[in-house]
Image: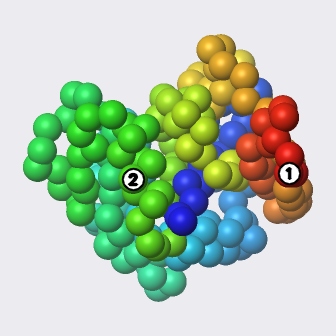
Amino acid sequence: MRKVIVSEFVTLDGVIEAPDKWQFPFWNDETGKLKVNELFASDALLLGRVTYREFAKAWPSITDEEGFADRMNSLPKFVASTTLKEPLEWNATLIKGNIAQEVSKLKQQPGQDILISGGAGLVHSLMKQDLIDEYRLLVYPVVLGSGKRLFTDGGTVTLKLVETKPMGSDVVLLTYQPAPKTGDSHG
C-alpha cells in the first residue's frame, strides 16, 4: 500500500505560506539531498489548487543537472480543487467527487509514496480522515507572526515523533507519524 507523505517547510510559529520568501537563506546541500531523495521515492504528487497553480507556472521551465526538475515535471499530479476545471496542464488530473475516497483509492494502488507539498486545506482534510501516513516538517528558525499555518483550529491529531535530524543552517527535520488511536492494541 502506498503512503501519503506530507512534506512542508515550516516556520517556528507554524507558517507554511510563501516559503520562497523565508527559507532560501537556510538552504544547503543536505536539505537539497533530502528533497531529491524524497521526490525520487515518490511516484505521484497530491496538490491543492493554489500549490498546483504555483508549481505548474514555475516548474515546466526549470532544468537542473540532478534530474529533479525532470522528475517533478514527469510525475503524475492529482489536484484537489472544487473550482478548477479539466483539462489540467502539467501532467495533472483533477480529483472529482469525495477527496478522501479518491485519495484512499490512490493509496490502495501499487506504487511508491504520494507526496504532498503545500496545500494546508488539503492536509487538514486528509488529516481528519486519517489518510496521512507521515509528516516531514523542515522547521526553520523564522517567526513570521502571521500567514497560512499547517495546523489550525478545528481538530486534534496526535502524532508520534519518529525522527529528529539537524539539517544545518539551524533547520531541523521533524518526522512524525500518526500515533495509534487510544485502545489500539499495537504501537
> Is 151 placed left or right of 90 in the picture?
right
Q: Is residue 156 above or below residue 55?
A: above
128, above or below 21, in the image: above
Q: In the image shown, does 150 or 145 lie closer to the viewer?
A: 150
Q: How many marks?
A: 2
Rendered location of residue 163, percent (x, y): 86, 58
Q: Residue at x 60, y 68 (%)?
A: 38
Mark identifier at residue 105: 2
Amino acid on which the number 2 mark rests in the picture: Lys
Q: Is residue 175 left or right of residue 153?
A: right
Q: Which residue is mark 1?
A: 186
Residue 111 point in image, percent of width and height = 46, 73
The percent position of residue 124, horizontal first and vertical second, equals 55, 30
Q: Which residue shows up at 33% across the image and 57% down it?
A: 77
At 55% from the left and 34% from the top, the residue drawn is 129
The answer to whether residue 157 of the structure is visible from this angle is yes
Residue 65 percent location from the top left of the image: 47, 85
- Which quarter of the rendering shows the N terminus? bottom right
Q: Residue at x 75, y 71 (%)?
A: 30
The image quadrant of residue 61 is: bottom left
Residue 180 or residue 84, whichever sits in front: 180
Of callouts 1 and 2, which one flags the residue occurring earlier in the amino acid sequence?
2
In this rendered view, identify the residue nearer to me: 166 or 142: 166
